[in-house]
């Protein structure tokens, strides 16, 4: 209630009369105290961020990449964040500096610096350089990630449909499929580590999108417009793949299991699939 009873000083300004203005020494010590407070706050924030036990922090929220291409994407992501944070630090620093050391002390305007050519040129050149550097690294990394080797070790034809996936290995005459989540086993995509794998993506109905979060990569699966990409897996493990393009009622259930195995395990698995699939197709003829 004290706020309601509080009255503004005459003239609409709620400030101390001129005669009681703080002395120069008091002003300086207040400025110092404000700077100290700002410094403590910055150190606290840095500590809170730096002491995080989760190393997702150093990846700025990205999952741990499991492909050569994903590692490139991660470096670009980290570099862009660091560049952004450096620009942010300069801007936030200048804002804080103005707020702490250049508070309004009267109605007199401070010296104006309009049409100062060196400053105007700096304002134009610095953002241009920043964008040029970001563009260079983006274009360079995009070319590397989009590169498809002339002779990939493994080729997988991926077909997306409402609401599941089919994986065909044309070099081995093997096809795997499955069910959407909740209806049965998910389709299995098995690939070897340390080998180049090319994916050819097609859809039989609407636009889907092939996404393995640990690849740090997704690519649209479009009917009538085959898409391609290639990866080299760097570690073994089991992961979940998703459709990341809203494609209808059960879009969220359109999952698949990705298994990255050693080349020897991959060859064994392919041989098993060939034996079981060919005996099934032989017995149904
Ligand atoms: Cu889909």
Image (tube, helix red, strand yellow):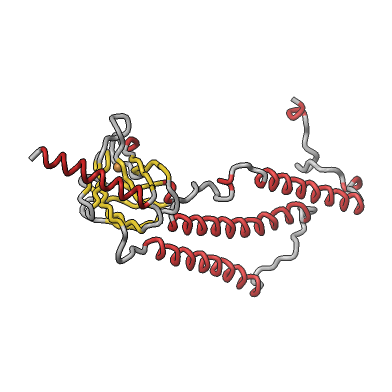
Q: Residue furthest bottom?
A: 117
In the picture as drawn, the residue positioned furthest to the top comes out as: 1
The single residue placed furthest to the left in the displayed view is 285
Q: Is residue 254 left or right of residue 93?
A: left
Point 35% across, 47% down: residue: 265
Q: Whole-percent x and y of residue 214?
A: 44, 47
Residue 52, percent from left and from top: 64, 43
Of residues 155 and 283, which is closer to you in this image?
A: 283
Q: Could you tell me which residue is drawn at 33 percent across and 39 percent down?
A: 255
Image-quadrant location for residue 276: top left
Pick the quarter of the image with the N terminus.
Answer: top right
Residue 22 left/right relative to 200:
right
Image quarter (top left, top right, bottom left or bottom right) of the C terminus: top left
Point out the quarter of the image occupied by ligand 1.
top left
Rendered residue at 35%/51% (across/down): 264
Return the x and y of residue 41 as percentages of the image width and height.
74, 45
Q: Is residue 151 left or right of residue 32?
A: left
Residue 179 coordinates in the image, percent (x, y) = 27, 35
Position of 119 with respect to 35 (left or right) is: left
Which residue occupies the foreground of this view, 155 or 117?
Answer: 155
Query: Which picture quadrant has residue 195?
Result: bottom left
* x 26%, y 37%: residue: 178
């Amino acid at each position: 209630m004290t706020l309601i009873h509080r009255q503004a000083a005459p003239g609409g300004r709620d400030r101390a009369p001129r005669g009681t203005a703080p002395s120069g020494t008091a002003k300086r010590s207040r400025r110092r105290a404000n700077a100290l407070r700002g410094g403590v706050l910055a150190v606290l924030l840095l500590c809170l961020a730096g002491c995080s036990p989760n190393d997702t922090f150093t990846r700025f929220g990205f999952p741990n990449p499991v492909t050569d291409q994903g590692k490139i994407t991660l470096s670009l992501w980290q570099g862009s964040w660091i560049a952004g944070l450096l620009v942010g630090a300069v801007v936030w620093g200048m804002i804080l500096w103005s707020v702490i050391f250049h508070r309004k002390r009267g109605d007199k305007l401070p010296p104006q610096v309009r049409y100062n050519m060196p400053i105007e040129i700096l304002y134009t050149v610095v953002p241009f350089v920043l964008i040029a550097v970001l563009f260079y690294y983006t274009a360079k990394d995009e070319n590397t990630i989009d590169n498809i080797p002339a002779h990939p070790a493994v080729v997988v034809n991926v077909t997306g449909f409402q609401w599941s996936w089919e994986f065909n290995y044309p070099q081995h005459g093997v096809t795997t499929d499955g069910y959407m989540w909740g209806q049965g086993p998910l389709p299995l995509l098995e690939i070897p580590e340390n080998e180049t794998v090319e994916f050819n993506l097609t859809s039989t109905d609407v636009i889907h999108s092939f996404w393995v979060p640990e690849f740090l990569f997704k690519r649209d699966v479009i009917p009538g417009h085959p898409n391609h990409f290639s990866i080299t897996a760097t570690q073994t493990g089991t992961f979940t793949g998703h459709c990341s393009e809203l494609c209808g009622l059960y879009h969220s259930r359109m999952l698949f299991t990705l298994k990255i195995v050693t080349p020897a395990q991959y060859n064994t698995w392919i041989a098993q699939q060939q034996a079981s699939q060919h005996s099934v197709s032989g017995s149904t003829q």
